[in-house]
Image (cartoon, rainbow, N blue to C red):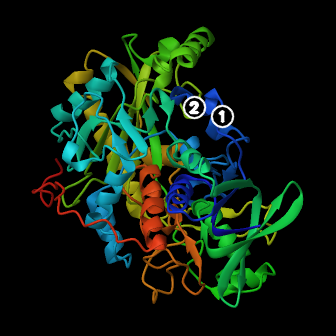
Amino acid sequence: MDADYIIIGAGSAGCALAYRLSEAGHFVLILEYGGSDAGPLIQMPAALSYPMNMKLYDWGYKTEPEPYLGGRRLACPRGKVIGGSSSINGMVYVRGHAKDYDTWSKMGARGWSFADVLPYFQRIECWDGAGHGGDFSWRGQNGRLHVTRGKMENPLVRAFVTAGKQAGYQLTSDYNGQKQEGFGPMEHTIYRGQRWSAASAYLKPALKLPNCKLEKGLVTKVIVENGRAIGVEFIAKGRKLSVKANREVIVAASSINSPKILMLSGIGPAKHLRKHGITVVADRGGVGKNLQDHLELYLQVAIKQPVSLYKYWNLFSKARIGLQWWLTRRGLGASNQFESCAFIRSAPGVEYPDLQYHFLPIAVRYDGQAAVKGHGFQAHVGTMRSLSRGAVTLRSGNPADSPKIRFNYMSHEKDWTDFRKAIRLAREIFEQDAFKDYINYEIKPGRGTQSDQALNDFIKEHVESAYHPCGTCRMGSADDAMAVVDQDARVIGVKNLRVADSSIFPQIINGNLNGPSILVGEKVSDHILGKPFLPKSNQQPWNAENWQTFQR
């Protein structure tokens, strides 16, 4: 068996690559360990908490004991299914801030500035503002990824936006348009009431072409001969197989599995590879390093009026919602319920937003456990640009073993300062008149948790991953010793091998990672095909003029 291009991983970037390369007439083989995305638990937006907690769809990774969080081991879900993590995520769509990509360019990822990537985001999107405003000139209407908004019918969802305005913050009609900063509607990858994953947008159309094939198996290594990637070894149905790549191998297996596969292939820190009995093909010290993520807390509030989604938190209502969705693709089941949000700056002197709030009109965890027996709401409170860095390393030379994942969460003092600010600013927002008739009391952290030490203790015990790992195969200039791929996503030191997924991010972006991961697949496909890049945009993003002296 052979192919022009072998793509390892049918996740967000891998699906986009498969579509674009096969559309161009090349024979493409995708190797994916996971199975089908069929079934309501993936496809129904309101059921989002289920697939990321199921072994069928999730790799089930956990971090090593995190030293700055009291030795806690945090969940690190990664999609083990076609569509990858786009099939198990919260369906939130965020491009990131313009300065994220300008920073990438300054870090050595030339050709990845905001002016370079904006046209690709527009190519990706089939956007619908759903009647809640938006910035049409900044959006795409003809792409493969459906992006829309919820109905915002719940009064708490609207109150959150109003409260932000009352607290003196900016409003934005489109945080994915010219102006990210502010309070406004949240966007999601849902189409006609159903999850619109990368598998739906890209992979399934690609597989209808005669020159695109999907093979199920566990990749054990990229085969490299004389410094050139020539194929891939994998295990399927208990047999070790190999497939030849006539042109290139592209690793798109996630920020966790991509560095693992590179290291199993002999590409990585030489000392670490030799420790596990792996022959060194290319000594690249940056493989697995630079691991980043977003952390978040749930600030939860009990309310006096029965207007939250708690009224549906019973078996009968869940069954009715599920049946309605199954028959009509409408109703509460057709939304992820994240329908308003905010991106704000935490202090004067912060140039662009460094805090993100997801609002949810119920007090509940991702794992489905209600926080209180009664009505409430919550904000997912998170910082955007942590200075903490971790690593993915091999547990052994056995491909079946999970890698070691250690983020070193909260290892930088500024992380603690930023999180305390995030909590206090969220509390201030909830104290505005828009919430006056609703709020009963604060559930978590609780009003008694006020001092820096008390907040630190709460953070240490309760902070959770937002499930946005990235950066472990960092993109940079070819002479950067810690870069893994160059600006064309080519692995430095190995020919005919690329990495294309969130692992190549030099720095984490402002927001959820699904959209930027798809961006990588779309843009890298043009690099591979040798197509002229889309013309740079001359659109100028909004930025607060008084950011040096004012916080809002």
In the image, taking residue 533 as reference, residue 455 lies left or right, namely: right
| Residue found 52% across the figure and 78% down from its top | 490
Amino acid, disc 1: Ala
Q: Percent x, y for residue 229?
A: 66, 80
Note whether residue 63 is visible.
yes
| Residue found 59% across the figure and 13% down from its top | 323
Amino acid, disc 2: Gln
Q: Percent x, y for residue 217?
A: 77, 57
Q: Quadrant of residue 185?
A: top left
Seen in the picture, residue 426 relative to 251 is either above or below; the reply is above
Note whether residue 445 is visible.
no
Q: Percent x, y for residue 530?
A: 43, 74
Q: Which mark is residue 43?
A: 2
Residue bearing mark 1: 38
> Do the numbered discs 1 and 2 sit on residues whose CB atoms are within 8 Å?
yes
In the image, taking residue 501 as reference, residue 10 lies left or right, namely: right
User: What SS does tag 2 mark?
Assistant: helix
> Which of the pair 76/144 is nearer the observer?
144
Q: Residues within 10 Å of mark 1 (few under 14, many from 20)?
A: few
Q: Residues within 10 Å of mark 2 (few under 14, many from 20)?
A: many
Q: Which mark is residue 500?
A: none
Farthest-out residue, right: 238
Seen in the picture, residue 116 relative to 300 is either above or below; the reply is below
Seen in the picture, residue 334 relative to 437 is either above or below; the reply is below
Q: Quadrant of residue 432?
A: top left
